[in-house]
Image (cartoon, rainbow, N blue to C red):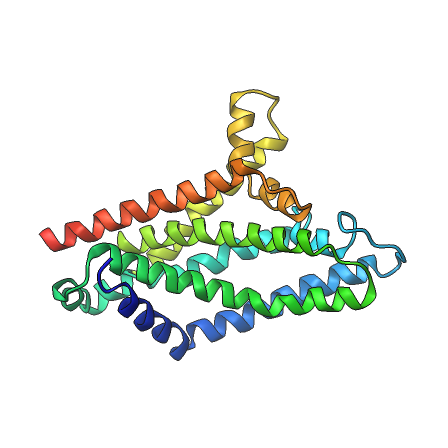
Amino acid sequence: MSGFWAILRREMLSLWVTPLAWVLLGVFLILQGGIFYSIVAHFASFSDLSVDEGPLGAYFGQNSIFLLMTLLLVCPALSMRLLAEERRSGTIEALMTAPVGSAGVVLGKYVAALLTYVLIWVPTLLYVVILRKTGNVDWLVMLSSYLGLFLVGAQYLAIGTLASSLTKSQFVALLVTVLIQFGLFVLGIGEYIFDPGVFHDVCSYVSLAGHMEDFSKGIVDTRRLLYDTSLAIFCLFLTIRVVDSWRRA
């Protein structure tokens, strides 16, 4: 873990000084603003909004397909450059000879991307404030919904970090991450297709729609927590092994 804080500061500066994070933030807020507006407009004719049936549940739940698709694009865009750009520009050699451990490099970059992901979602708290002015908001449900978004982001960014370590091209890293995430997304749809059984259970376990549906209702399923954290840790472990191989090359 040596050099973790130095890598974290360096990566945060790199993300927010360059246009990447700002452009991503702008596009993200435009998309989310449109999604939120359409949901609120749909529920505007209802005078009594409950947590499960109101705009808050609809925004975070599986019915908000645009939110789910946004998650499939934001994380690859954040993670594609983490290690691929270092290799393309040739700065990885200097980084490998510096007194920084492989775990420090990988986790420093990963945590920087995860913090940026969290910061991108912070402005959406204004949506909750708006709903609070017009109806009742269950704050525990709101917290569980954001926890669900955090866990999804954590695992997707870990997948993206691994993909970024396997290529020198940011575009290839983006495509690989999107394909893996989309594959998991399609596999999760099997939850609503297959009859009860082993395959149905596997699909249910990885279902992004089911994941967000549970959290948007205030249901914190330990199976979801285990899946998200295990996948993230596994991908980061593999990434550290990849970076270790660069030192031995």
- Apparent side of residue 243 relative to residue 127 in the rendered image (left or right): left
Q: Which residue is farthest top? A: 197
**Rendered residue at 60%/70% (across/down):** 123
- Residue 56: image quadrant is bottom right
Front residue (pair 104, 83)? 104
**Rendered residue at 36%/45% (across/down):** 233
Q: Position of residue 239 (x, y in %)?
A: 28, 50
The answer to whether one can see residue 249 in this image is no
- Apparent side of residue 178 relative to residue 96 in the rendered image (left or right): right
**Rendered residue at 67%/52% (across/down):** 140
Q: Position of residue 58 (x, y in %)?
A: 72, 52
**Rendered residue at 58%/51% (across/down):** 68
Q: Is residue 192 above or below residue 36?
A: above
The answer to whether one can see residue 115 in this image is yes
| Numbered marks: total | 0
Q: Which residue is farthest bottom? A: 17
Q: Position of residue 195 (x, y in %)?
A: 61, 22
- Residue 172: image quadrant is bottom left
Q: Position of residue 219 (x, y in %)?
A: 64, 42
Q: Quadrant of the N terminus?
A: bottom left
- Apparent side of residue 2 relative to residue 71 in the rendered image (left or right): left
